[in-house]
Image (cartoon, rainbow, N blue to C red):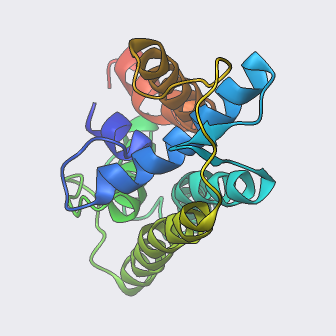
Amino acid sequence: MPMIGMWLNVIFGGVGVGFINMFVFIVVTVFLAGLMVGRTPEYLNRKVEAREMKLATLTLLVHPLCIVGGAALFVLTGWGPTTVNNSCSHGLSEIIYEFSSAAANNGSGFEGLGDNAAPWNIATGMVMLLARFIPIIVPLAIAAPLAGKRHVPDSTGTFRVDTPLFGVLLLATVVIVGALLFMPLGVLGPIAEYLGGQ
């Protein structure tokens, strides 16, 4: 469960962290809802266009790329396997947790991992830099032009974002996108560890 929380990274906890990622998911959900009802997507009476979606997609992809890229680098080189406590799926879970924690503002560690070495410190520092600052800067690049757009009045075809239906659609988007991005990593590490009884 801690890894799932760090992977989705939309749970409100740290100052601004969950909210800013939730904003990106709201933009994606508004876009998907607009496609489903056949209208130009709108959020806060402003049109969400291709530029905003490209930036939202970039923000959503930076987080898993940092985690998966870092874990893949350390699994394929000698830096990871020589520092884990267990060479099976638990060892992979240790590596995944280290990069998930670095990317998701958590800062905790998985005991058993010998991560107090230069390669680990440099790699997790780079992951922190990329996975924390890009998802802060890019939503600002979404919000600024969105705020400058012309106000579009409500009509009968407007998909409102203050309804339970939108809440369910937002939750489904977070869960489905999160599963698509992180399920392979979870299956190889923590889920295999749980099912294997290690």
Q: Left or right of 147: which side holds 98?
A: left
Tell me what residue is drawn at x 35 percent, y 21 percent.
Answer: 194
Instruction: Point out the image quarter for the C terminus.
Output: top left
Q: Nearest the camera: 185 or 76?
A: 185
Q: Left or right of 149: which side holds 35?
A: right
**Residue 60 rendering spot, x and y as whole percentages:** 58, 51
Query: With respect to residue 160, does 72 lie above or below?
Result: below
Would you identify the image quadrant in which residue 197 lies?
Answer: top left
**Residue 182 rendering spot, x and y as whole percentages:** 55, 37
**Residue 131 rendering spot, x and y as whole percentages:** 47, 67
Would you identify the image quadrant in which residue 10 lies?
Answer: top left
Q: Nearest the camera: 122 or 46?
A: 46
Tell me what residue is drawn at x 50 percent, y 44 percent.
Answer: 44
Q: Left or right of 70: which side holds 54?
A: right
Query: With respect to residue 46, does 29 lie above or below?
Result: above
Tell me what residue is drawn at x 40 percent, y 73 percent.
Answer: 128
Q: Is residue 84 visible?
A: no
Instruction: Point out the image quarter for the N terminus.
Output: top left
Tell me what residue is drawn at x 63 percent, y 54 percent.
Answer: 56
Q: Is residue 183 visible?
A: yes
Q: Nearest the camera: 3 or 145?
A: 145
Would you identify the image quadrant in which residue 141 lies?
Answer: bottom right
